[in-house]
Amino acid sequence: MNVLRLVCWLVTALLVMGAGTASASENSLKFGMSAAFSGPSRGLGIELYRGAAAYFDFVNAGGGVYGRKLELLPLDDGYNPIPAISNTIQFIEQDDVFALFSYVGTPTVTRILPLLIKYEKENAYLLFPFTGAEPHRQEPYSEYVFNLRASYMQETEAIVDRLVSLGRRRIAVFYQADAYGRGGWDGVRKALAKYRLRPVVDVSYPRGSGADFSYAEQARIINEYDADAVVTVGTYASGAGFIRDMRALKNTALIANVSFADGDNLIRKLKEMFPGDTGFLTDNIVNLQVVPSYEDTSLPAVREYRSIMDQWAKLPPVELNPEHYSPRQYSAVSFEGFLNARLVVEMLRRMGPNPQKADIPDVIEKMTSYDVGLDVPLHYNHRRHQGLDRVYFMMLRDNRHMPVVNWERWRL
């Protein structure tokens, strides 16, 4: 009889512990973020994390969403596909995340796309990745991915249109030798074709190259072809190294960098390498963004972002910041992470007190007129999984990263 009572007690205890575990999971929602927290592109992952985590912490301090706290689970992939695949499997199979969120990079995102189909029954969706590439915007993967940012096709078309309007028709391309770089190169090529033009020359470099890599050969080739503008499709580290080697040839061609190059960190890297530079390196550089300037406090989202970052910004866990990255107070990348998180919270608010993964597509696709705080409505629907289209042009002015206001300085 005593043995029977002991067995009954153990069963009851196990049921209670199980119920407690279920209750804990019901009181939080997890979002898995695989990004570069190490290597030459770690600034992207860290800044994106800082913006998203700050907003989640702000919401959690107010009680969460319908009482549920939001957990951001970051894992490092070093901007490499294989770790990104492993991280994604862990998020889905072990961590039971509500959604994959704010992944960084084309080579990583592109390789995890088949997993979204593999885990279709688990309702695995990727929300607001930091990449403007085409593969996840096209079938068969587009139904599993929701983007906030404009595409690289839109970015490259916008800058080519601007360059041609300034009389700069000899356009070269400097690109990363992978899916990301080739996608950007293709965007430039297609944009130039509208004007019956083609790149005067294109040169590539291996993914993973940092600012200390020599880009002298790529710079020499572009210099020989007398390009009057260069569109770069790379990272902030490679962009800084390339600009250094171009200017070493006394070449002052206008250099335009797509948004993944992270203009804030690119400029900072140049200043670190050449602290005495008076503008020779940083003049004639245009950086593209897919979010407005964080200096534009006329926008509600910018005001809220700056206030929340001032109070809630933090670095990722110490194991994800072994190189002791020094963050910026504000940055375009952390602002984008903030907007991504803001949109997640709006999605959950619309789901009500019983959120379901399966409802993600229906809820986001109905955000046809929601303003995330940028004074422009989002444009989601069943056939369109991208919220914003606008591209912004930035330059260094008065030692600040500011919108371009005078293009005439670059007219030929």
Image (spheres, rainbow, N blue to C red):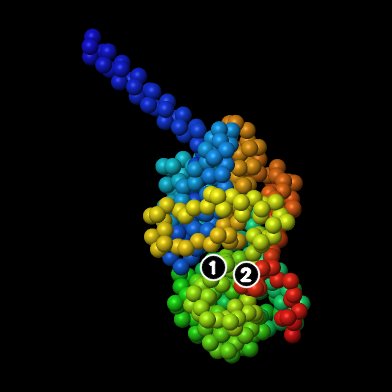
Label 1 to label 2: alpha-carbon separation: 12 Å
Q: What element carries label 2?
A: strand
Q: Give the residue displayed 55% in from the left and 60% down from the top.
A: 329
Tell me if I can see residue 62 in this picture. Answer: yes
User: Which is closer to the viewer, label 1 or label 2?
Assistant: 2
**Circle 2 is placed at which residue position?**
400
**Circle 1 is placed at which residue position?**
265
Disc on the earlier residue, 1 or 2: 1
User: Which quadrant would the N terminus be assigned to in this image?
Assistant: top left
**View extreme (top): residue:** 1
Q: Give the residue displayed 55% in from the left and 33% down from the top.
A: 67
Q: In this view, does 47 lie above or below 265?
A: above
Circle 1 residues within 10 Å: few <14, some 14–19, many ≥20: many
Point out residue 258 in the picture as x, y percentages from the top left corner: 61, 69
Q: In this view, does 296 lie above or below 357?
A: below
Q: Which residue occupies the foreground of this view, 105 or 201?
A: 105
Amino acid under disc 2: Arg
Amino acid under disc 1: Asn
Circle 2 residues within 10 Å: few <14, some 14–19, many ≥20: few
Point out residue 229 in the picture as x, y percentages from the top left corner: 65, 81
Q: Give the residue displayed 57% in from the left and 42% down from the top.
A: 59
Left or right: 187 with respect to 249? right
Tell me if I can see residue 193 in this picture. Answer: no
Q: In this view, does 381 lie above or below 331?
A: above
Point out residue 71 in the picture as x, y percentages from the top left corner: 49, 43
